[in-house]
Structures are given as structure tokens and as C-alpha cells.
Amino acid sequence: MVFIMGCVVRLVPELFAFPYPIGYDVINYYIPVTTNFADHWTQISSQFPLYVSFLHLTQIATGLTPHTTVVIFATVTFGFFSVSVCLIARKVLKVDSKNAFFVTAFVIFQIAVLRTTWDLHRDVFALTMMLFVFALIYRESEKNEPKNLGWKFILTIILCVLTVSTARIVGSLFIVSLIIYSCIFKTKPVILCTILALSFFTMELSINHNITSNIVHDAISKTDHGSSLRSNFYNPKNLLYLFLVVDGLLVPTGVIGFVKLKNGILLKIPLLITAAASFSWTVFPLNHSLVSDRWIILLGIILSIFSAYGIYQLVLSIKIRPHRLSNLASTILPFSVLGIFIMMGILYEILPNAREPFMLWYGVARSYTDHFVPPSMQYNSLELSDNNKIISAISWINKNTQPNSIIIGEKHWRGFMELYLHDHRTFRFSDDLPALTSGLIKHPVGPVYLIQYSDTRDNKSNIYSNELFSINKIR
């Protein structure tokens, strides 16, 4: 039930978006890379290639389109993520099946979780593996010396390797958590898992190129009509609003869950790590390489587990009170809270723009958080309603420009260009389009065309325009 629920939740926004993909990295990374895997290997090999390698192998084995492969893989991964949360509820929180289902449903509808599964597919995969590992090693870590390691240990080792080989930030969180936990519970399985995971993670980093730049590249989220997250958006005010929007509602019951959870050190460690990293901007307010925005999102995912457990503890405290309304209140409270979050989650999944702040809690601070969190899941590098316009413009280019032409434009359209541009036409992009254009004029390499938003077009050189895009011939 939990697996199916997770798959359905993840599939809903895809069905509403059909036939267009959702997710910035989906249109600009996952689908193009799956389509032209060999051409992208240099880029792939320097950015933790395991997940996209799985996509590539799946696409070859099934013969599905790259878009369908990416969607199916993301959907199944989210189903397993839901199962991992349920196992954590059963093994670590030690709640019964009914309340484990409540915890899972509460977590998977959180904006932090939905934002992550929107386009950070590798992170969801790594988080899933991490939670499975926590569920497996938790019971053993309470014993001084287990009798044997067995098949569970072998499975745990495999999951550890998958975790640290998939996503850099989640892998870092996993490694630090295991190191701290192994210092507290010095049992053989935990120590061995820590050593092996650390070894693989170090090896993965050592074969990656430009590690620091990749961290920043992977961490920066891009939304808001194709504008990237620049340093001027990375400031304490915006990050504080992001924390309040993503994590604020979870803090009160999250604190209760943290205090009430006994012997839950394994889960408390990553919570405290992500909380500390989320507020690194208080010490280094303008250093966006610390990616506090990503840590705030991760905090929201882990905090939601504690928040659900806090609600569970509140219900228990109400039940023990000798009052006729106690049973009624203990029933209404969890269903009411869960219903509110489910409603907000579904609206976030399906609303085209999510502009209605009176309907969505996070809509109130949208002008501050759009650069970190997409306005809704019905979005990639453009609003989905605008996808047909850029495809139409590219189709015009294919029919009306010379083969081997150079097309220049914003980098956020590179995925569309790679997928739809034909006949050896080349797309070049830059944060400084005037400088790129000037350079191509001074050093002619063939016909050059500029695609841009119609409201910035030059009427003298304009040769095509639709409602959103215009194309100018530069030379």
C-alpha cells in the first residue's frame, strides 16, 4: 500500500503535465543525457554517474523513450522512498502499522519532499538508500556484539555504496552521520559500514573533476522564468523566508517528536547536521557555495519524520486524559493535520502557477523563495503552457535556417535545443548574451541566429516571433 501510494503521488503531477516533462534538471540534464549518453559521458563522469547510468541501461533494456524512462524511474524511486520512510517509522520510531502509514503519508506530501522529487531525482534515490540503511543497522547497533553479520549486513553494504555513489550532498550527510553514530555505538556492522561507505565516497570524489564547481552547479536550483539563482538572491532574508516556508510549520511538532523519541540517535544525528548546515548563512551570509538552500530542503525532509512522530505523541497524550471528548479529539487531530498537508501537497503538484497565496501557505513568500523552490511542480525551465511556444520556435529554425547554423540564447533552454534542434545546428548559451553575440560577429563561423523573449526583440533583424519568443538573424 505504501509503495503504491508513493508511486501515485509522484505520478499525479506527471499526468497533469503530459506530454511535457516537469523539473528543471529533467529537461536540461536527465532526458538529454539519457538520449545522448555517449556524447555526455565527460560531463556525466564528473557528476556521480550512477543514477543516470541506471537510466541509460533501463532505456536500452526496455526500448522506452528517454522521457518515459526518466518518469518511470522517478516514480518507482519515490515509491521505494515511501517504503523507506515507513520502515523508519516501524523500526526507529517504533509505531504500529497504522501510525507508520500516517507518518509516511505526512512525509511524502511535504513541500520539501515534493520539491526534491521535482527534479533532484538522484537525491531522492540516495535518501531512499540512506533510510533503508538506517532501518537495517538500527537494531543491530543497540547490541554490543551481534552473533553474525548475515545477509542483512551484505544488503546494508550494497545500500551504503549506492547511497554514497549517487548524490554528493546526501552522501556527505550519510557519511558524517555514520561516523558520529559509529563513535557512539562501536559495533562491528556500524564500523564496517562507515569504513566502506567513507572509502567509496572518497574514491568517488577523487575521480570527479572540478569538485567545488560541481557542488555549486548541482546545488543551485533554477526557476522563475528561466533565471538562475545568482548571488544577489542568495541572502539572509530570502533564506530565512525559505526556512519559514519549507520548515516553519514542522518545527513545533518536530521539537516534540525530537524530545519524545528515545534511543533515536541514528535519526537525530542527520537532523542536527542538516539544521546546522541550514543556518550556515548566519555566519557566512553571502557564501552561496555552502548551499544553505539545499540543506534547508533536506532539513525539511528529515524534520517531517519527527513532526509526524510529534503529532503521534500528542494524540497519545490526549487519549490518556479522562475526558469524554478525548477520543474524538485524538481522532480529529491527526486526520485534520494530515488533510491540510495533503491538500497543500496536491495543489503544489497540479496548480499551473501556484500564484494563489490564500490557497497555498508558501505562496505568501513566493517572491523570496522562487529562486530556490519552483512555484509549482507544473514547471520545468519554463511554465508548461509555454513549452509548445519554444518547441514551435525551434521547429521554425529547423525549417527556415541553414544546416550547421549557430543558435544562441539562454542556457535554460539548452535541453529543448538539444532535443529538438536538427541538422547539426549548434546551440550556444551564456550568462552574457551580448558578449557572446559580439564575439561571434567578430569571428564569423557561419550563420548566427539569436532566440530571445519577444519583448526584448530587435525589430530591424527580427525574422520570426510568436507570443513568447522571437528570432533575430545576427549575421
Image: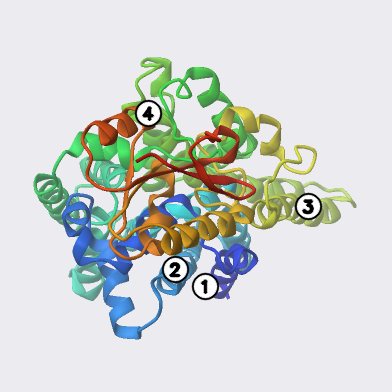
Of the two numbered discs 2 and 3 on the same chain, state the one appearing first in sequence.
2
Q: Residue at x 21, y 40 (%)?
A: 183
Badge 2 vs badge 3, beta-carbon distance below 8 Å: no
| Residue at (23, 53) in percent of width and height | 164
Residue type for callout 2:
Phe
First along the sequence among labels 4 and 2: 2
For label 3, the residue is 336
On screen, residue 106 versus residue 219, left or right, reads right
In the image, what residue type sits under mark 4? Pro
Mark 1, residue position: 3
Q: Which residue is mark 2?
A: 80
Which three-letter amino acid code belongs to the residue tagged 1? Phe
Determine crowd level at label 3: few under 14, some 14-19, many 20+ residues with C-alpha closer than 10 A.
few
Q: Are marks 2 and 1 in contact (CB under 8 Å)?
A: yes
Q: Report helix, strand or loop for mark 3.
A: helix
Q: Nearer the viewer, residue 466 or 172?
A: 466
Specify the quadrant that holds the N terminus: bottom right
